[in-house]
């Protein structure tokens, strides 16, 4: 990280032990208090005794599925913020390594016989040779984490809205498509509540950023994960402030600017055939990534507000939207992949004494996993 960011993150917490320690997300600029409130609301509704899970869902969709779905709902909700934090950390590394690369390449532009000439320096060591790759790695990490937040948001939407989709395999695109279908076909009161959320959600997406921001983020993520990487394009611009030599001449000092692809869902050949249009975004990659972060924060907060309203409505209208079996169609899995690691039995797993966070303890009890309650699983429907 840049020293300015390290100094900011190393600023001590207050010494008052009566004041709760702030979430690190605040220091990273990705605090989402409304989503945090939704997370705590769901946690409060987890019952540590029968009927277990989210108690007011009972008797639906059966005890075992209620436990599995309830715990996964809470896990998805927490993971939205986890992904936002990881994205912010990747972005700080993008800024740091971009500065390092710009400093290394500051003197690549020279004036020879009245012409500007670019002479790339030979890397002095493997770390210098990897500098640009490290920047790309953290750009990818920034967007992949934001896409992870979207999928986890999709899982939260499945649970809160009682959508008939697997919550363990939540996919943001699938959830969005389902909501659009419900908007078009809603007939019952419960479906109309789902449809109302779906319409508000589309408006939240539109208002969170410039046209196409979400589609671009998902297409860029898919290119990074599933496709051949696009050619990287950038330019050298005059570093500011401009420096002058003893004779008043401008000292050429370059700053490298990298541009992300404008249409990441298309191939290099396709975009270069499209001559009238720029194949890249005419802004620095840091500007694009910062903008995505702000758009995601706005979407997360707006969605939290609307999901909180649905959750409250469902508490008082329990028969209008029941938790569907389709959210966990096959019950608790008992099959293992069979992978035991590369050096099994290097350490002994002996959980007879476990120290954990109180929230994890509550989750275990709400899932009937403490020693006294676990035998009940044999009787759960």
Image (spheres, helix red, strand yellow):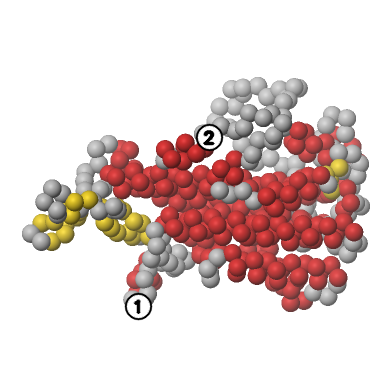
143 relative to 75, above or below? below
Crowd band around label 1 with a 10 angstrom C-alpha radius: few (<14), some (14–19), many (20+) = few
85 or 144: nearer the viewer: 85
Q: Which corner quadrant holds the N terminus?
A: top left
Is 184 displayed left or right of 22 in the figure? right
Residue 276, numbered label: 1
Q: Estimate the spatial distance between the alpha carbons at disc 2 and disc 1, rounded to whole Å.
A: 49 Å
253 or 316: nearer the viewer: 253
What x and y, as percent, mark residue 137? 43, 47
223 or 236: nearer the viewer: 236
Residue occupied by mark 2:
11
What x and y, as percent, mark residue 51? 91, 44
Is 129 displayed left or right of 139 in the figure? left
What x and y, as percent, mark residue 105? 26, 48
> Dot 2: what SS?
loop
**Which residue is rendered at x = 63% and y = 28% of the image?**
15
211 relative to 376, above or below? below
Residue 165 in view (yes/no): no
- Res 275 → quadrant: bottom left
């Amino acid at each position: 990280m840049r020293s300015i960011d390290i100094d900011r993150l190393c600023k001590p917490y207050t010494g008052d032990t009566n004041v709760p320690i702030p979430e690190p997300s605040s220091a990273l600029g990705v605090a989402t208090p409304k989503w945090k409130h939704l997370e705590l609301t769901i946690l409060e509704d987890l019952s540590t005794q029968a009927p277990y899970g989210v108690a007011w869902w009972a008797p639906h969709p059966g005890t075992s599925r209620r436990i599995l779905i309830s715990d996964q709902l809470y896990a998805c909700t927490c993971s939205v913020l986890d992904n936002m934090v990881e994205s912010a950390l990747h972005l700080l590394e993008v800024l740091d390594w971009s500065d390092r690369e710009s400093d290394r390449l500051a003197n690549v532009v020279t004036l020879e016989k009245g012409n500007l000439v670019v002479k790339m320096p030979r890397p002095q060591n493997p770390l210098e040779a990897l500098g640009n790759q490290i920047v790309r790695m953290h750009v990818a990490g920034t967007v992949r984490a934001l896409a992870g937040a979207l999928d986890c948001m999709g899982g939260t939407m499945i649970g809160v809205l009682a959508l008939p989709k697997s919550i363990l395999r939540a996919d943001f695109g699938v959830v969005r498509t389902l909501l659009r279908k419900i908007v078009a076909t809603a007939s019952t009161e419960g479906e109309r509540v789902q449809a109302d959320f779906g319409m508000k959600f589309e408006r939240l997406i539109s208002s969170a950023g410039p046209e196409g921001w979400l589609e671009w983020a998902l297409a860029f993520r898919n290119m990074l994960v599933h496709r051949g990487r696009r050619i990287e394009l950038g330019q050298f611009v005059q570093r500011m402030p401009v420096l002058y030599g003893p004779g008043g001449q401008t000292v050429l000092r370059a700053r490298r600017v990298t541009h992300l692809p404008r249409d990441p869902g298309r191939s290099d050949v396709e975009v270069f055939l499209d001559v009238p249009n720029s194949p890249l975004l005419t802004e620095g990659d840091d500007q694009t990534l910062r903008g995505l972060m702000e758009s995601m924060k706005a979407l997360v907060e707006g969605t939290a507000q609307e999901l909180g309203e649905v959750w409250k409505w469902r508490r008082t209208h329990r028969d209008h939207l029941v938790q569907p079996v389709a959210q966990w169609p096959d019950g608790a899995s008992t099959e293992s992949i069979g992978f035991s690691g590369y050096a099994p039995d290097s350490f002994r797993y002996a959980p007879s004494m476990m120290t954990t966070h109180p929230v994890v303890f509550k989750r275990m009890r709400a899932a009937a996993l403490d020693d006294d309650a676990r035998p009940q699983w044999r009787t759960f429907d």
